[in-house]
Image: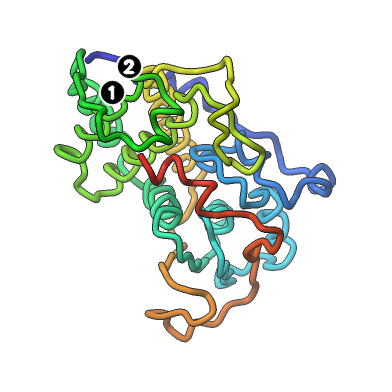
Amino acid sequence: MKISLEYQSDLFEMDAVAPVRPASLSGRSGAFVDNMVLPVHRWFRYSAGFSADWVRCLVRERCGDSSSFVVLDPFCGVGTTLLACDAENLQSLGFETHPFIYRIANAKLRGIHVDLSTLRSVFRRYADSIPCTSPVDLGETPPLLTKCYTSEVLSLLFTMRDLFLAEFDSKTPESELLWLALTAILRSCSGVGTAQWQYVLPNKSKSDVRTPLLAFQSKASEMLQDVEYAQRNSWCSGSHTLMTDARAPVDCPQAQVDAVVTSPPYPNNYDYADATRLEMTF
């Protein structure tokens, strides 16, 4: 199926975000919401997080001009701290135990350094391979998915998922960005509501629902734009993530760090599993 993934690079010659203003962050530095307008951070909404601009302000104040400054985030989530350090050309280390969230962080951290033309080619080949019709048996579909999608939308999403698994799941940085693009459009293609902490509300409805193909086109174009932005602004590749428990990290060298920037697991009954249940079920 043919869909357009073109974008005009000259439109993005200016920075995509306004200069960081620490005073404006004081009230929402502990919230992820502002990241949804920031390149790369906006690829996947994860409410259990904090402001990337706040991290950049913080490390600028603490590290000075030292390129050897190392930051640790023992609960790194989707990589907010590590990406902020990449943008500041600093080394960073992150721990994460949730395999799904760890994969998202790695996809972003590796993906910003891919060859842009190769990534565009992967996206285009995938889009061109999506069949125009998608007869999929929905008989064994988990109830959560049938509550969140129409049968037509769900059938097409399954077709797109199966195509990825059969032909594109090569575990390269480019294929992981393709996986992330498919994962990131699931909410926008659903007609059910979402609570503040990303809990799915099957009994609530929303009016802004996108078709899977248009949602994928938009997300792929957004990723191409942001990879170009990160490379043009010389984001470094000094971050390293480990899927390990911060309480007893394994496969971790005796590294010395200069700062710890993190948001530890919330004590107020935030359900990390429920917040990603839709994506994990799919």
Q: Is residue 183 left or right of residue 3?
A: right
Question: Which color mode does the image show?
Answer: rainbow
Q: Amino acid at mark 1?
A: Ser
Which of these two is toward me, 76 or 61? 76
Q: Residue at x 55, y 16 (%)?
A: 208
Which of these two is toward me, 140 or 219? 140
Label 2 to label 1, Cα distance in Å?
Answer: 5 Å
- Locate residue 266, reporting x and y percent: 67, 61
Q: Amino acid at mark 2?
A: Glu
Per the image, the residue denoted by label 1 is 155
The quarter in which the N terminus is drawn is: top left
Assess whether mark 1 and mark 2 are in contact (beta carbons under 8 angstroms): yes
Per the image, the residue denoted by label 2 is 152
Residue farthest along the bottom direction in this orientation: 254
- Quadrant location of residue 103? bottom left
Disc 1 residue crowd, few under 14, some 14–19, many 20+, Cα 10 Å: some
Which of these two is toward me, 16 or 184? 184
Mark number for residue 139? none
Q: How many marks?
A: 2
- Quadrant location of residue 181? top left
- Locate residue 253, reporting x and y percent: 42, 83
Q: Residue at x 64, y 55 (%)?
A: 270
Q: Is residue 113 left or right of residue 276?
A: left
- Locate residue 216, reporting x and y percent: 37, 25
Q: Residue at x 21, y 44 (%)?
A: 169
Disc 2 residue crowd, few under 14, some 14–19, many 20+, Cα 10 Å: few
Q: Secondary structure at mark 1?
A: helix
Q: Secondary structure at mark 2?
A: helix
- Quadrant location of residue 120? top left
